[in-house]
Image (cartoon, rainbow, N blue to C red):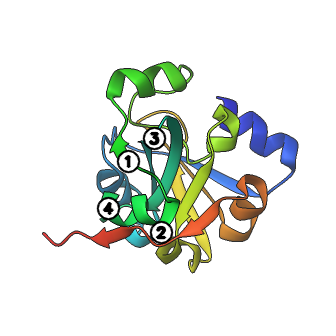
């Protein structure tokens, strides 16, 4: 996995755990016994003609209109699954790690997530979670911080 190699080379501390297959960030949070607010899910959007990785907390969704305004874009839409599959060929579809920099994608993180002391995310498979400090994550990825999500209530 590209992300594990990257983390090893960077010298940061991280933990890897295995869990039952989880196909959403909320399922992974439950499998890992981690509050959803600490679980990061990457969502790929197309802003005008550029793909971006948006990283937000598991129980949240992207407000595309808000994001569009903050980016100053004419249009913002979710990327298609087939487009995402081509970008992340080393990952299971839907298990992409929140490291846009490893895939030549600018990365934006939601402000609500950056206040956390750590971040947990899928490591490229539906059975693996990686946990690391938020400070190390931000140092390695250098994401732009914006406010673009809303909490989904069940």
Q: Residues within 10 Å of mark 3 (few under 14, many from 20)?
A: some
- 128 over 120 or under it: above or below: above
Q: Which residue is label 2 attached to?
A: 38
Q: Which residue is label 3 attached to?
A: 48
Q: Earlier in the sequence, mark 2 or mark 4?
A: 2
Q: Residues within 10 Å of mark 4 (few under 14, many from 20)?
A: some
Residue at x 17%, y 73% (from the top left corner)? 153
- Nearest to viewer (mark 2 / mark 1): 1
Is 137 placed left or right of 127 in the picture?
right
Is 114 placed left or right of 135 in the picture?
left
Is 15 placed left or right of 42 in the picture?
right
* Label 4 element class: helix
Residue at x 55%, y 62% (from the top left corner)? 109
CA gap, disc 2 and disc 1? 26 Å
* Closest to the observer, 79 or 89: 79
Q: Which mark is residue 76?
A: 1
Q: Residues within 10 Å of mark 2 (few under 14, many from 20)?
A: many
* Label 1 element class: strand
In which image quadrant can residue 118 be found?
Answer: bottom right
CA gap, disc 4 and disc 3? 13 Å
Q: Which residue is label 4 attached to?
A: 65
């Amino acid at each position: 996995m590209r992300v594990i190699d990257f983390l090893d080379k960077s010298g940061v501390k991280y933990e890897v755990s295995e869990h039952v297959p989880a196909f959403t960030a909320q399922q992974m949070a439950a499998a890992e016994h981690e509050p959803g607010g600490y679980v990061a899910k990457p969502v790929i959007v197309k802003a005008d003609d550029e793909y971006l990785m948006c990283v937000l907390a598991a129980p949240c969704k992207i407000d595309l209109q808000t994001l569009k305004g903050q980016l100053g874009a004419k249009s913002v839409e979710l990327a298609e699954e087939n487009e995402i599959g081509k970008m992340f060929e080393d990952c299971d579809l839907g298990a992409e790690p929140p490291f846009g920099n490893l895939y030549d994608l600018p990365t934006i993180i939601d402000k609500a997530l950056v206040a956390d002391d750590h971040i947990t995310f899928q490591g490229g498979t539906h059975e693996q979670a990686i946990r690391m400090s938020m400070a190390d994550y931000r140092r390695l990825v250098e994401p732009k911080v914006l406010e673009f999500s809303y909490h989904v209530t069940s």
